[in-house]
């Protein structure tokens, strides 16, 4: 038998797996994140040796390993192929390139072996519906005309498939000293503290009705949350106008968005869109959907346990209508699919 071998290298959906430390069953510990790092080097370790109906099916199996991987697909005279997937291969490609970045080392010429590139999901809820159920860092593409975006997906908080667009817990990233361009583009990294950026957040909330959940941690890992059934962020020409409603009665912390921030554009030190005589972003230190400078401030400086309205990271209702600094927080959305 003259076997023809095609070797491909995949820069897959998940760049690397990121794990939560602490007891995974204890909700209060889920804000502690650490990274396992990227696979690297040129050594091969077999993940799976199986049969595949086609080269496309073999590459799909590679993608489903959620790892950086390569495949060897060997054709037989009967049209059945041996599909071997490997881990720890040297990466070919960079973030933002065409979906899956398949590189064919040797042509595989069977008629039915046209390689189909892996399509990126719109968001974490689509990934969840595809069967990805592990919390971690993934690539998504909310807008097919734009580059892929690296995000943290919370797959284990029921009902699963949450796209985390804001995550802070250790003060390793500055959230407050950004101008309009900085908040538009986003900052940090999904493996740790980050904000996805207003432009991407706008795109994510235009796909369908979107639920927002705000998870908050205070002193001694005290946990509370607020959930809203409808959340949308307008385009830049609306100043990223916030439209939010449907505060859920099951929430464990009082609403600070519907009454305070709904209908407001984003305010920064260089773009004042609030209803106060001064600039709330300058006064409170950090961008937000400011109205009269009250309510919540998720982008303020990190001052755990400090009661200070100016220059603090707080949700006013967490400690009973005061401004004590929080220990950690995430904001995440889930699209109806």
Image: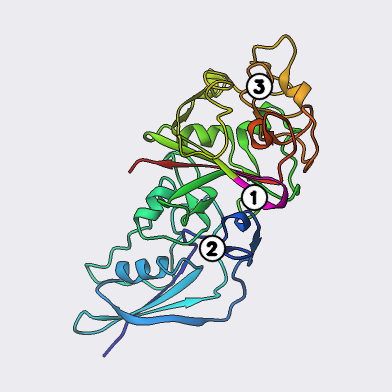
Q: Assign the N terminus to one quadrant of the image.
A: bottom left
* Circle number at residue 25: 2
Q: Which residue lies furthest to the bottom in this view?
A: 1
Question: Which residue is painted at 75% across and 49% down in the image?
Answer: 172
Looking at the rendering, the stretch of residues picked out in magenta corresponds to 216-223
Answer yes or no: do the residues labelled 3 and 2 have beta carbons within 8 Å? no
Q: Is mark 3 on a helix, strand or loop?
A: loop
Task: Tell us which disc is closer to us: 1 or 2.
Answer: 2
What's the coloring here?
A: rainbow
x and y percent of residue 124 in the render? 44, 49
Q: Is mark 1 on a helix, strand or loop?
A: loop
Q: Which residue lies furthest to the front in this view?
A: 320
- Whether 259 is drawn above or below 320: the answer is above
The residue lying toward the viewer, choosing from 255 and 213, is: 255
Mark 1 and mark 2 lie on one chain; the one further toward the N terminus is: 2
Mark 3 and mark 2 lie on one chain; the one further toward the N terminus is: 2
| Circle 3 residue | 267
């Amino acid at each position: 038998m003259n076997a023809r071998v095609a070797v491909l290298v995949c820069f897959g959906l998940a760049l690397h797996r990121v794990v939560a430390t602490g007891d995974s069953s204890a909700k209060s510990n889920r804000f502690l994140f650490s990274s396992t790092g990227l696979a690297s080097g040129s050594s091969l370790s077999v993940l799976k040796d199986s049969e595949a109906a086609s080269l496309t099916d073999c590459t799909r199996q590679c993608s489903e390993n959620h790892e950086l991987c390569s495949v060897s697909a060997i054709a037989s005279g009967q049209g059945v192929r041996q599909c071997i997937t490997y881990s720890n291969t040297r990466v070919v490609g960079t973030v933002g390139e065409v979906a899956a970045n398949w590189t064919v080392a040797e042509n595989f010429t069977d008629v039915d072996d046209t390689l189909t590139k892996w399509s990126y999901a719109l968001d974490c809820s689509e990934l969840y519906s595809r069967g990805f159920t592990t919390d971690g860092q993934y690539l998504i593409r909310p807008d097919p005309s734009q580059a892929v975006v690296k995000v943290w997906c919370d797959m284990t908080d029921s009902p699963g498939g949450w796209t985390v667009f804001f995550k802070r817990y250790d003060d390793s990233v500055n959230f407050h000293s950004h101008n309009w361009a900085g908040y538009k583009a986003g900052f940090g990294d999904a493996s740790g503290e980050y904000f996805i950026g207003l432009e991407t957040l706008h795109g994510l909330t235009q796909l369908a009705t979107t639920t927002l959940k705000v998870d908050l941690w205070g002193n001694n890992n005290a946990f509370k949350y607020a959930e809203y059934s409808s959340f949308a962020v307008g385009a830049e020409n609306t100043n990223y106008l916030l439209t939010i409603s449907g505060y859920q009665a099951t929430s464990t912390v009082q609403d600070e968005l519907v009454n305070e921030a709904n209908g407001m554009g984003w305010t920064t030190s260089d773009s004042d869109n609030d209803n106060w005589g001064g600039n709330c972003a300058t006064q409170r230190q950090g961008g937000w959907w400011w109205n009269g400078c009250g309510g919540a401030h998720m982008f303020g400086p990190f001052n755990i346990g400090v009661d200070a309205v100016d220059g603090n990271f707080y949700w006013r209702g967490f400690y009973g209508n005061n401004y004590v600094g929080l220990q950690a927080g995430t904001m995440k959305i889930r699209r109806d699919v």
